[in-house]
Image (cartoon, rainbow, N blue to C red):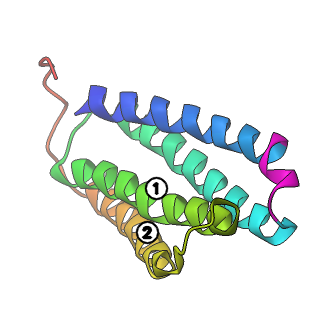
Amino acid sequence: MRKLFLRAAILLAMTAVILGAFAAHTLSSKISPDRLDVFQTGVKYQIYHALSLMGLGIWFYFKQTSLMKWTGWLWMAGILCFSGSLYFLAVRDWLGLNLSWLGPITPIGGLLFISGWLTLFLATFQENGKYVRKED
């Protein structure tokens, strides 16, 4: 699990940087400032949770609880739903696509983020001992 979360975190952080640069250098002239802000909000939440996922993956080297696994999966799903929906909603006019149905997906992503943080909090009460090293 630790390697999966670390690898996912690295890829998610890398894509957040790429998307942020894309927004600054390409989208800024293609979409309105309001839509650009929406896109950048997706980038911010993606990088915050990618870095958090990286910390979780490192934590797995020292301790592992069942709820910690849930935390990682909830954060990854939150990035997909929250940030992903914001990206597409921000560029829908530029792409010429009717993606308004994605609007309700954004708050679901937010709930997934919150649920991940709650499970991490609850995981601090679990006593499963140190992580036993085995190949992921």
Q: Quadrant of residue 115?
A: bottom left
Residue name at image x 70 percent, y 62 percent: 94
Is label 1 in a helix, a strand or a loop? helix
Say whether marks 2 and 1 touch (CB < 8 Å).
yes
Q: Is residue 56 magenta?
A: no
User: Where's residue 75, x and y in %?
Assistant: 39, 55
Identity of the amino acid at label 1?
Answer: Ile
Q: Residues within 10 Å of mark 2 (few under 14, many from 20)?
A: many
Q: Quadrant of residue 30?
A: bottom right
Is label 2 in a helix, a strand or a loop? helix
Residue position for label 2: 109
Q: Quadrant of residue 22?
A: top right
Question: Magenta residues?
Answer: 25-31
Q: Residues within 10 Å of mark 1 (few under 14, many from 20)?
A: many
Residue projecting furthest to the front: 96
Q: Tag on residue 79?
A: 1
Residue name at image x 28 percent, y 31 percent: 4
Q: Earlier in the sequence, mark 2 or mark 1?
A: 1
Viewer-closest of 123 and 116: 116
Residue name at image x 47 percent, y 31 percent: 11
In the image, is residue 77 above or below residue 92?
A: above
User: Where's residue 78, x and y in %?
Assistant: 41, 61
Identity of the amino acid at label 2?
Answer: Gly
- Is 3 placed left or right of 114 in the picture? left
In the image, is residue 117 above or below residue 16?
A: below
User: Where's residue 126, x and y in %?
Assistant: 20, 54
- Is 31 placed left or right of 61 in the picture? right
Whether residue 35 appears in this view of the structure is yes
Image quarter where the N terminus lies is top left
